[in-house]
Amino acid sequence: MENNEIALIKRAQKGDVNAFDDLVRLHDRKIFQLIHSMVGNFNDTYDIHQETFIRAYTNIATFRFESNFSTWLGRIAINFTITWRKRQRLKFWISLEDTSNFTLQWKQSDEANHQNSAENKLLNKELMHQVERHLNRLPEQQRAVFILKHIHNYRIKEIAEMMKCAEGTVKNHLFRATQKLRKVLLPYYKGLAEL
């Protein structure tokens, strides 16, 4: 954490609303993206996003500087999202419409890419559909860890702090999620490699 952020947190803990507003501006986008990747639609994302910052404001006095402030906020967002999901009894899913946040890469020569670009686009679209479909089928903890690691680029330690579990548990969830996805997506990668 930067000194400026630490100062803002301390001021917010003393009741300075403007300092908290500055903290919101610093972390707003990242928390919104995290929630949206877990929820998948903007209306629910806005509601959960707002509730996350309300909870952060009410509980800022409990922040002890033992982790990054963004990790603490992420934990609040994840916990509320999971609670929301249970209340709504909706499937936890990920929208992969915006592939700029999640890319799957495979090796092909430039010549193959040029010759088969239409077919590549079709296979890529099908691959994204399959990734979304199979991510939705993962157990909640595995799905959350996979998203945090591979879509939001959190470190294992940060994920463990957010999910309140050991780093080994995070690694285990990540390994299992990756293995399951690899198993079901392998035929699509093979199809791309044959082009």
Image (cartoon, grey):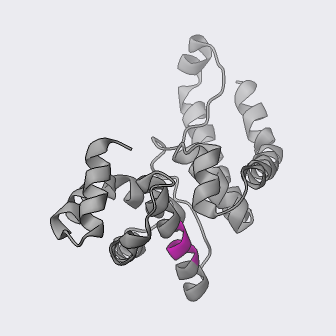
Q: Nearer the viewer, residue 18 or 82?
A: 18
Assign the magenta stretch its main secondary structure.
helix
User: What residue do we see at 39% from left, 53% from top?
Assistant: 30
Image coordinates for residue 82, horizontal then vertical, percent? 58, 74
In the picture, measured across the screen, residue 131 lies left or right of residue 63, that is right
Q: Is residue 171 magenta?
A: no
Using the rendered image of the protein, determine whether residue 8 is visible from the camera's viewpoint: yes
User: What residue do we see at 25% from left, 70% from top?
Assistant: 14
User: What residue do we see at 55% from left, 86% from top?
Assistant: 88
Quadrant in which the C terminus appears:
top right
Image coordinates for residue 41, horizontal then vertical, percent? 43, 68
Furthest-left residue in this view: 18
Q: Is residue 140 above or below residue 129?
A: below
Q: Is residue 80 magenta?
A: yes
In the picture, measured across the screen, residue 139 lies left or right of residue 52, that is right
Q: Is residue 62 above or below residue 22?
A: below
Using the rendered image of the protein, determine whether residue 133 is visible from the camera's viewpoint: no
Quadrant in which the N terminus appears:
top left
Q: Nearer the viewer, residue 128 or 73?
A: 73
Image coordinates for residue 104, horizontal then vertical, percent? 61, 36
Q: Which residues are magenta?
A: 78-82
Furthest-bottom residue in this view: 87
User: What residue do we see at 21% from left, 57% from top?
Assistant: 22
Q: Quadrant of residue 165?
A: bottom right
In the picture, measured across the screen, residue 180 lies left or right of residue 162, that is right
Q: Quadrant of residue 110?
A: top right
Q: Nearer the viewer, residue 143 or 104?
A: 143
Q: Is residue 28 above or below residue 54?
A: above
